Amino acid sequence: MDIENAKVQMRKGILEFCILKIISKDEVYASTMLAELTSAKIMVVEGTLYPLLTRLKNAGFLDYRWVESASGPPRKYYLLTSTGQEFLAEMSSTWEELQASVNQISNASPKA
């Protein structure tokens, strides 16, 4: 297994969680999500983001609304549903537990 593939797999595992966290802050346009992910060094392309947004919507976690744009076609803004908020709360709890576990293992002194 090469290191680049391992990094990609780690990022993919948390992508759904990161997207839900971004949307939980406010209604958000897809390009804004991409920019926030990129600034956090989670490189995602539209071809990955849009199918994931569709899956999350079909699961009942997201909804969207169209907003007219003065500079082009209408924009689709995503927001969490109440089911999505509950799902994110569970994922956040799991993330905190996982993060604590990894930190405990990473910071443990070597056994003599």
Image (tube, rainbow, N blue to C red):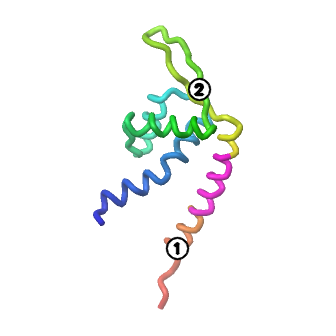
Quarter holding residue 71? top left
Q: Amino acid at mark 2?
A: Tyr
In this picture, residue 73 sits left or right of residue 27 = left
Give SS at disc 1: helix
Q: Is residue 6 above or below residue 62?
A: below
Residue at horizontal 56 percent and vertical 71 percent from the top: 104
Q: Earlier in the sequence, mark 2 or mark 1?
A: 2
Residue segment shown in magenta: 87-98
Q: Position of residue 5 (x, y in %)?
A: 32, 58
The picture places residue 83, in percent across and down from the top left corner, at 69, 40
Q: Magenta: predominant secondary structure element?
A: helix
User: In the image, is residue 4 part of the stretch drawn in magenta?
Assistant: no
Instruction: Report which residue position mark 2 lands on.
Output: 64
Question: As displayed, is residue 43 above or below residue 103?
Answer: above
- Is residue 89 on the magenta stretch? yes
Left or right of 111, for residue 41 = left
Q: Which residue type does callout 1 highlight?
A: Ile
**The N terminus is located in which quarter?**
bottom left
Residue farthest to the bottom? Answer: 112
Q: Is residue 80 left or right of residue 10?
A: right
The residue nearer to you, when weighing 10 against 57, is 57
Q: Write the residue at 51% across / 26% down.
A: 29
Q: Residues within 10 Å of mark 1 (few under 14, many from 20)?
A: few
Q: In the image, what residue occupies the spot 62% across and 58% down?
A: 94
Secondary element at image label 2? strand
Q: Which mark is residue 27?
A: none
What is the count of numbered marks?
2
Name the outermost residue toward the left: 2
Q: Which mark is residue 105?
A: 1
The residue lying furthest to the top in this view is 70
In this rendering, is residue 22 above or below 9?
above
Give residue 66's quadrant in the image: top right
